[in-house]
Image (cartoon, rainbow, N blue to C red):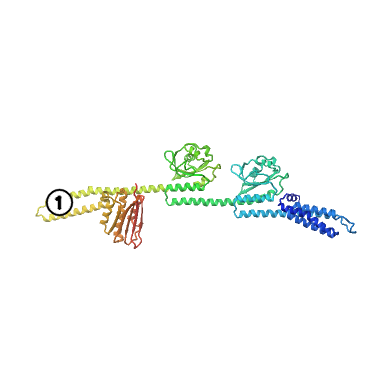
Amino acid sequence: MLGGLRGTWLRQLSPTRQVAAWVLAVAGPALITLAALGWQSSLVLGGFLFCTLLVVMAVAVIGGTRPALAAVAFGALAREFFFVSPSEMPGVDLRPNLVSLVGFMVAGAAVSILIGELIQLAAEQAALRRVATLVAHGAPTDELFAAVTEEVRRLVVVDFVRLARYDADDSLTAIAAWSRTGEHFPVGSRWPLAGALTSSVSRTGRSARVDNIATVGGPLGDAREHGIRSAAAVPITVEGHVWGVMFTGSSLKRAPRAGTEACLASFTDLLAAAISNADSRAGITRLATEHAALRRVATLVARGAPTEKVFAAVAEEVGQLLPVGSASMCRYESDGTVTFVAQWGSAVTHFPVGSRWSLGGHNLGTLVFETGRPTRVDNYADSSSGPLGVPIREAALRSAVATPIIVQGRLWGLIAAGSVLEQPLPPDTEARLASFTELVATAISNAENLAELTASRARVVAAADETRRRIERDLHDGAQQRLVSLALALRAAQAAVPPGLGDLGSELANVGEGLVSVMDDLREMARGIHPGILSEGGLAPALKMLARRSAVPVEINVHADARLPERVEVAAYYVVSEALTNAAKHAHASVVHVSAETAGQVLHLHVRDDGTGGADPVRGSGLIGLKDRVEALGGTIIVDSPAGAGTSLHAELPIAE
């Protein structure tokens, strides 16, 4: 009872309610006394005590315990001084009865304390309900912290309320504050974890109190300059670890009332739930954002985008995803240097794309090159050295992390991210960067494999063309020359046949005609292997020759009078030749349209017939060979052949060497 009396005595109420309660505490007993004076009887006296008790209850509801206790005292005094005269009514003793007086005072005090406690409990529940509503609605943490400090200062008689967060560097940061006595511990201020109160909470994870703040050192002890005499602190425990602390201070000489920590703990539990929810939402949002960034990069990789575009996209995504001021990607060279292949953020002017730097000293490029592992530097501005040290200091980078890019088991390069803020980058920065390095490694590996495949295709096509030329030369210089010699010898023998041997002459003439036919066939074969007119006259005459020799009428339109690179002319010749052959043999077309023109650095070939269609590039070895030949030059070929609607072939060949 004494603890409740002390606690309810210290509660705060609004000035208006306090004034109303004190007026009722004085006026209520006075009015009841005036009304009862004219009715001097024991029954009226009992009614007086009952009515006074009702007034005490009303005062307790309005103004709390202090005015209610005053109303009890005023009622007792009125009972003592105004109902004492036994002379006016003989036989009726109206003198104060000690038992009834004590009973009235005890009952009045008990009612005052009970109602005060109920009101306090209702106020606490209402405050908790308001805070819980904010938590349930996902209110911003700043708004929630401010609301909690406001609710606590209404419920507990204190002169300041502070919420602070424990930081990784053994310090505290004020995140919400309310003060009656001054602006000590303003929001955003930081101080070392040196005080007995906050360090005890951090170490033990339990509530703590200081009854005499003058004995406490550190920043909290400085609060005595503002008249603070005592303090209590309660931990904010989030998912098993002490996240922060709520502490209050009072200028009263007495220690904080019993139950203060329990009251604060009710709010810290809600804060812990809100922080956990906020962290979960932030984690989900961050994960979704990170996955979206990775998905965009992965899409570029899957589509075979140029590596330069992938590198630039990765640097931009990293820079926007992480709390950094710059992001870059570098490639290690064989001569002990590093080249910046992508850059985003504030360091672009200091490390432009394409710039090349020597390794050495203390910097991320050298550390990753030497270790092949993720690396971080938290004091970059003071510790960087080597050729990269000067631009690093000029860029004002304070901390940075880097992860290696490993391509097919070898160290290819690195992705780095730097910050100009004093706080080091979060501990999970390396892991988040690693997700991008894996995609970059895949893109680089794909590009290298594609380049090797393209080069291999080009070598195969070049070797095939060279083989055709060699066969052509062998036929021309070998078999064809021998056939020519045999034909000349046969003609000489035919001329030497006597006139009487007419049958022999006819026989020799037939053999000579056969040799000429074989020579023509051989010449035709050699021309099919590699047409001489293509080497001598270029693409336009060669295509016109194909049109003249085609079994199907050909309408040809060539706008490529200037000579093109030999590899382009040869590929274009074989594309048209294969298309005309297919139109005659398989499509049964009546006409074929052929067009060839250059636009910029690309030769466009279009062959269209009106045949039966239905050509399948997958099943046709000729079309597959054309695809290999065209793509070996970096070009594209598209075949559109719906059944019954003819076949259309479009090829694009880059002209640039």
Which residue is situated farthest in the bottom direction here?
644
Q: Would residue 98 be seen by someone viewing this image from the given angle?
A: no
Residue 174 higher or lower than 116, as above or below: above
Residue at the (10%, 54%) spot, across then down? 501
Residue 362 position within the rendered picture, expressed as x and y whole percent measured from the top left: 50, 37
Residue 61 position within the rendered picture, expressed as x and y whole percent measured from the top left: 73, 55
> Badge 1 is on which residue?
491
Residue at the (52%, 37%) spot, across then down? 383
Mark 1: few/some/many CA within 10 Å (<14, 14-19, 20+): some
Horizontally, is 114 left or right of 567 in the view?
A: right
How many numbered callouts? Answer: 1
Q: Nearer the viewer, residue 396 or 428?
A: 396
Q: Nearer the viewer, residue 334 or 565?
A: 565
- Which amino acid is tagged 1? Arg
Horizontally, is 168 left or right of 563 in the view?
A: right
Q: Would residue 141 be seen by someone viewing this image from the given angle?
A: yes
Horizontally, is 190 left or right of 306 in the view?
A: right
Which residue is situated farthest in the left direction here?
500
Residue at the (34%, 62%) spot, across then down? 645
Q: Secondary structure at mark 1?
A: helix
Residue 460 position within the rendered picture, expressed as x and y whole percent measured from the top left: 33, 48
Residue 458 higher or lower than 44, as above or below: above
Residue 503 position within the rendered picture, expressed as x and y whole percent measured from the top left: 12, 56
Horizontally, is 512 left or right of 144 in the view?
A: left
